[in-house]
Amino acid sequence: MAEEGCSCLNTNCLERPLRRLFRGLGSGVAACPWPFVLVPLLLSGGLGAGFFFLPQREANDIEEQFTPTWGPAKADRDFVRRHFPTNDSERFSAQRMPTEGAYAALIAVATEGSILDRAAGRDLQRLDAAVRTRDFDKLCVRSDGGCADPCPKPLLPLLNSTAALGNLFFPVTNGTFLGAALGGVRTDPDGRVLSAQALKLMYYLREDGSAAAESRQWLEGFLRDIPSKLEALTAIKVTYFTSLSRQQEFEGNTHSVIPLFSVTYFLTITFSIVSCLRLSCIRNNVWLACCGVVSAGLAVLSSFGLLLFCGVPFVVTVQSAPFLILGVGVDDMFIMIAAWEQSSRKKEKSDVRSRLAETYAEAALSVTITTLTDVLAFFIGTWTAFPSVRSFCLYTGTAFVFCYIYILTFFGGIIVLNHRREQGNRHWLTCMPVQVGKGQAEKSCLYNACCICSCSGESSSSESEHPMSTFFKKYYGPFFTNTWIKLLVVLLYGAYLGGSIYGCIQIREGIDLRNLASDDSYVIPFYDDDDKYFSTYGPRVMVVVTESVDYWNETVRLGIENCTQNLEAISYVDKNFSESWLRVYTNLAANFSININDKTLFINNLSVLFKNAPNFEWDINKTQDKIEASRFFIQTVNVTSTVDEKNLLNQLRETAKQCSIPLMVYHPAFIYYDQYLVIVQNTVQNVIIAAGAMLVISLLLIPNPLCCVWVTFAIASVIVGVAGFMTFWDVNLDSISMINLVICIGFSVDFSAHISYAFVTSGESSANKRAIEALSILGYPVLQGAVSTILGVFVLAFAKTYIFRTFFKILFLVILFGGLHGLVFIPVFLTFFGNFGRSPHNTKSEKPEYRFRCDKDCP
């Protein structure tokens, strides 16, 4: 056995039976191709009926899909809802809401001068009147017996022509905080407002009982009518937003990408035809290329229909999957065609059954390895806290399974039918018999390709080497095995790795919610104005005492005060704007000599607090004899980026955790901030598990440990490169880019596995020659696969939505770096280390045109 070079150390026992299995499958397809063609068509038609359930399966709720399933803020929100119920009909307070609420928001910016000028004030009055039409007063949240004001009371004169605007101080006037309503403020040394550029108006609507549906209708009408009403305003420029806007704009993205799929299909078919084109009216592989694309389309139809039948949610991110699946399916087609044409050069196996059996033995195992790694990477990607990632990975992984099945059945049958046409000397388009004329040599290549047999005058049965294979063999391979070029490649890789590591250090986390809308959406200018004029003051955060504690115990009160001060000491918190009922109560007790050190007196005298500050009654959840929970408020500042959001959340929660009193910090925005807690952990976890699984698969299916080492190296190198260069292309690490990093794992295996496999099983005597042979056999199919995949997602670069552009950007990086490793780095590095682990019997005497050499079983 050792004399044959077939020890299990060098050729894995699992690979051998699989090759025999694929040979048998290939032989069966060749013997009876029609069932293998028709059954996939019928199966796709049946499963495709699952698209009937698409409207019921669409799940595009932003919070549900793009925030962690078990995020701590969701549990905190439930706690706040239970202990501090709201009453929008009587006592509304925006800062005390457990959710964002139902609202219409407007930012008015003065076109000239100040928003406090008379001209701007008149336009603001018109704007306010326009908003209050359509029965707003019946649906508005209420406070103090009327509709809650859209801006703080000191600014109400701007909306009331009968009142004069008094002295304003920023950010607090008469105890009222103006930082969230007045922007672009210029003050004198005493803090008196001299001018301001922007005013934010918030119109809240009720969500209790039946009012929720009516409020939604009102907001929808507001979005329809407001653009026309803004045209009459000259002194102010207004941007607008509602609580429905983010969700509506996100759902609208689903329609923008549908036209792009037809463009992608056209580009992919065109590329496949051109790359498979031959100047022969018989050996032209136009239909072969088209059917390869159709095979990928059938996989999409079957997999999506099956999962829709099974009730799997269909998220907007899944809509980018067909672009990827199309490219990968075409990649497998190129590998099959390359193996089919390679088998023709083995003269002793010229009949179709032997050729297809050899093709399956050559290509099917290679496709099996890459498909298995891709599918496994996607199914591992379902182990994540983000439902949008789970749905994408499940749909795409299942589609890859169908791609694999159909490439071995449907496309294999098409190869046989196409071969029969060639054997019958029939035209590629008309299928009519073609006779070679005596004067064909005198005709042009174009005439010969359309009307007779071939440009060269060869018979239809001859199989010439593709020009690109010749290019890789005679020019490309020798160029990159030159000593000086190798040195240049090593330096290039060093620069690539250095840049990638630097980018990884600088990577940004979290999804910006504005990116869920299209570029031309009305919400983008609103977000821009909000960032420009109102970013100084961030969320007003609840600090909740979650358990019943003895507030009447002075030691407990000191503990709460110390915890509050620790929170106020955080750099993102301004202690001057904190609001604490306990502090006010303690000061009242000191000023009016009220005893609050006794439980009964403490609880009974709360009425004095509520008389002086009625809003505090909403911050204490008490029963007859104890306080179940209570809350305070702190004001955050300078939260202007995703990094600030992450740091704020971590520091607040860590400080609250260290407190001796059971504290919880909460704001509705924390629902989205929670992604920072798991995004890196989930990504690293998935990458490590998937990379480990890839290594196991490689060891089981690739018959050389050296090849497995280089596959593992490529996985790590490509992932680092993609993650690093994401930073340079303004892509954050979020639930969307995480999807693509999962893709990265599978694709990094694809390119490196093909080339390194061909290298380690080559029969050439030197490392340089083995590298050249590997490139000549698989260089062109790998290049075709890379180009076809990029073409599959290329149109997404022109999408108006961040989700689809990000998909293109990262997949482009994956394919670029994966192809660069497969066609440049790996072949060069293999020439340095290629002799390690190589059997001394794997020599030039073996036939170099076949990648799998040893047909004997392992012991």
Image (cartoon, rainbow, N blue to C red):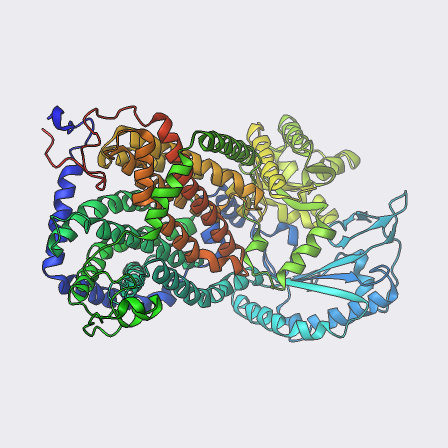
Residue at 61% over, 41% down: 645
On the image, the x and y values in percent for residue 534 come to 72, 51
On the image, the x and y values in percent for residue 204 come to 64, 62
Picture quadrant where residue 482 is located: top left
Relative to 118, 317 lies left or right = left
Relative to 623, 690 lies left or right = left
Picture quadrant where residue 16 is located: top left
Relative to 322, 24 lies left or right = left
Residue at 58% over, 33% down: 656
Q: Is residue 397 above or below residue 266?
A: above
| Picture quarter with the N terminus | top left
Picture quadrant where residue 408 is located: bottom left
Relative to 806, 382 lies left or right = left
Give 485 or 804, whichever is nearer the viewer.
485
Residue at 22% over, 44% down: 365
Residue at 32% over, 59% down: 276
Give 847 or 52, whichever is nearer the viewer.
847
Q: How many marks?
A: 0
Q: Is residue 417 above or below residue 780?
A: below
Give 747 or 486, whichever is nearer the viewer.
486
| Picture quarter with the C terminus | top left
Q: Is residue 716 among the parts visible in the rendering?
A: yes
Q: Is residue 746 among the parts visible in the rendering?
A: no
Give 510 or 829, whichever is nearer the viewer.
829
On the image, the x and y values in percent for residue 667 come to 59, 46
On the image, the x and y values in percent for residue 367 come to 26, 47
